[in-house]
Amino acid sequence: MTATAPHFGPSPSTHAPRRPLAAAALLAALVGMVFGLLLGGAGPASAHAALTGSDPQDGAVVDTAPKEVTLTFSEQVAMGDDSIRVLDPDGKRADTGAAPRDLQSGSTVKYGVSLHTGLPDGTYTVAWQAVSADSHPVSGAFTFSVGAPSKTTVALPSAEAGGGLVGALYGIARYAAYAGFILLAGGAAFVLACWQRGAGARPLQRLVVHGWMTLTAATLAMLLLRNPYTGSGKLADAFDLDGLKAVLDTKPGAALVSRLLLLGASALFVAVLFGAYAKREDEREKKDLTFGLAIGGTVIAAGIAGTWALAEHASTGIQPGIAMPVDVLHLLAVAAWLGGLAALLVALYRTPDIEAAAVRRFSRIAFGSVLVLTATGIYQSWRQVGTWSALTGTAYGQLLLVKVGLVALLVGIAWISRRWTARLVTSGAGGKEAEPRADARDEVEVEEPRTPGTSDAMAEDPARAAQLARQRAAVATAEKKRIRDADPDRSGLRRSVLAEAGVAVALLAVATVLTSTEPGRTEEEAARSSSAAAAPAAEGPVNLTLPFDTGGKNGKGKVRMDIDPARTGANELHIWIDSIDGKAMDIPELKLALTLGSKDIGPLPVVPVRLTEGHWTASDVQIPMAGNWKVAVTVRTSDIDQTTIDKNVKIG
């Protein structure tokens, strides 16, 4: 971002140096951008779906073959008919082949497939693939054994969904789509808001049109690649009509089609901007047309930005109703900032008559973009990272730190640009020319040898006259470039802005990678769930002691409980009730309940049976998943006196 406006030609308003207060405010905004983007992601905030549990668990050995296999996910996923496959040791299908059943209960996202009856002992492989609610494919595989582990001919897949050649092409298309949107929206905004005379400049026209073409081509490529990207991974399936039809029925497919329709409207906008608007001479009519184009362009740009927000990260996770409009604002601010920077760079290199007022206006727009990026970045950081440990200990957080470094570098270069700008203003105030004079063609005369009858010959030879006109124009252009490049202040500004643009390209690349990386918050949550699921089995039974007091007569005592073997599956419970003097205590009723709060499982009721005075038991108590379970015991000592006590116990 160029911090201040350079002086391009004599103008009383540009001879005075920028006030220190304004410079300090702009510098504070740049620092704010660093801190805002420190925790804010480049793309919308949310998470990929992660497998948080299964039944049977990964590596589990069960006594008898289960009737079904279930998978639990951290968020909503889209499942196809063949998304979950269970293979026996010989590689044959052990499931019935039916589509996965939705077993969702409350906030728990669970899917299951039924297995054939009479499965033999051995090791079975579960391979799954789905599309998370943020449009990214996820996949995985694990094994479990019936009876005892055995050799298996099935190799666990090492490649993740969305990888390979198709994944690389889809990633390139995603990057191109972001870049095209930035050039289209930011370049058009620069022309309308900063330099309206630039609507007639060919270099700026090409910049915006190339942005439109890039975004259109990238959107079409993503639409064709969507089926193999989330499915087979084979490039040939990009032209599968049935697969394309299935893509159109999904939320990401509908978003891509909507983007194409909005690009059609944006083509009309670009045609008017560089056609009727550029040629309009009447100031009043041009002002009205500027207002109309500004409103229409903002609506179209917000709609295109919304196609990312509605289909990807911002549409899922926590607070999607807030995250989606925040994401749209974030993308629009990025486009106004980086797209305007690209337009300024083109103007500095290709259009020698850019005005100082245009650069000042861009500085104000960039300042506003910084404020928006700061606010939206802070909110996005809370959704995507969540903790400092996720910032340093996850791939997403580490990429975010790389982005912070690039932003800091960009701010440093912007400060250099500001110094070059100040020198241009100072040189202009001192009377030194900062730009070539109004028209170099008036200063350069191409002397031609004249012989008698030359004028008549030229009049009779239009080709010769055209050639001489081209020579004069070429000489004039070369002279203008020589004078312009001879100004060291302007050359320094051009180099610093070019460096800013180079860093911005790298920044956009990191931002694109961030949009396809699992956010740190979800990665940590999935890791905690996996650790709980993979907790080592307890050695022998778990022993608990819980004191109680029902408040009535002889209402004090303690509960001693053994859980054997304290693992997933069937367990046996023995409970002893002792009075305060250590003797067996007979009570009229005893109840238990098991709850796994981290997975929203339970309470699972357990009804023990009285064996003898003070001794109760419960057989075949099924504990479906490993984790820290809360065991709640209700003790009733009379018709009206009872209490509930609880304690957490780790089931491996």
Image (cartoon, helix red, strand yellow):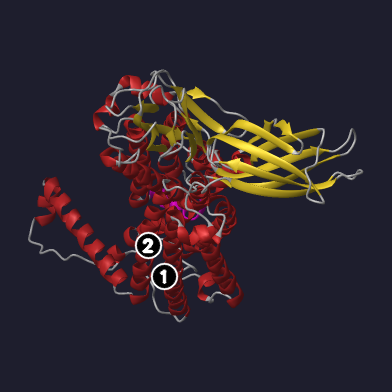
Seen at 56% across and 73% down, the residue is 23
| In this view, 525 is above or below 620 | below
Question: Quick check: can you spot residue 322?
Answer: no
Question: Quick check: can you spot residue 2?
Answer: yes
Picture coordinates of residue 249, whole percent (x, y): 45, 23
Magenta segment includes 550: no
Is the magenta region chiefly helix, strand or loop?
Answer: helix
Residue at the disc numbered 2: 503
At label 2, counting other C-alpha atoms closer than 10 Å, the crowd grade (few under 14, some 14-19, many 20 or more) is some
Tell me the distance, in whole angstroms, between the alpha carbons under discs 1 and 2: 9 Å
Looking at marks 1 and 2 on the same chain, the residue that comes earlier in the sequence is marked by 1
Q: How many marks?
A: 2
Q: Mark 1 belongs to which amino acid?
A: Ile
Q: Is disc 1 in contact with disc 2, using a CB cutoff of under 8 Å?
A: yes
Q: Mark 2 belongs to which amino acid?
A: Val
Magenta segment includes 196: yes
Residue found at the far bottom of this picture = 430
- Taking 321 as reference, is 488 left or right? left
Picture coordinates of residue 454, whole percent (x, y): 10, 56
Where are the magenta residues, as a range? 193-200
Residue found at the far right of this picture = 553
| In this view, 64 is above or below 422 | above
Q: Secondary structure at mark 2?
A: helix
Q: Nearer the viewer, residue 189 or 86?
A: 86
Seen at 30% across and 30% down, the residue is 232
* Tag shown at residue 402: none
Residue at the disc numbered 1: 413
- In terms of image quadrants, where is residue 601? top right
Q: Secondary structure at mark 1?
A: helix
Picture coordinates of residue 206, whole percent (x, y): 33, 47
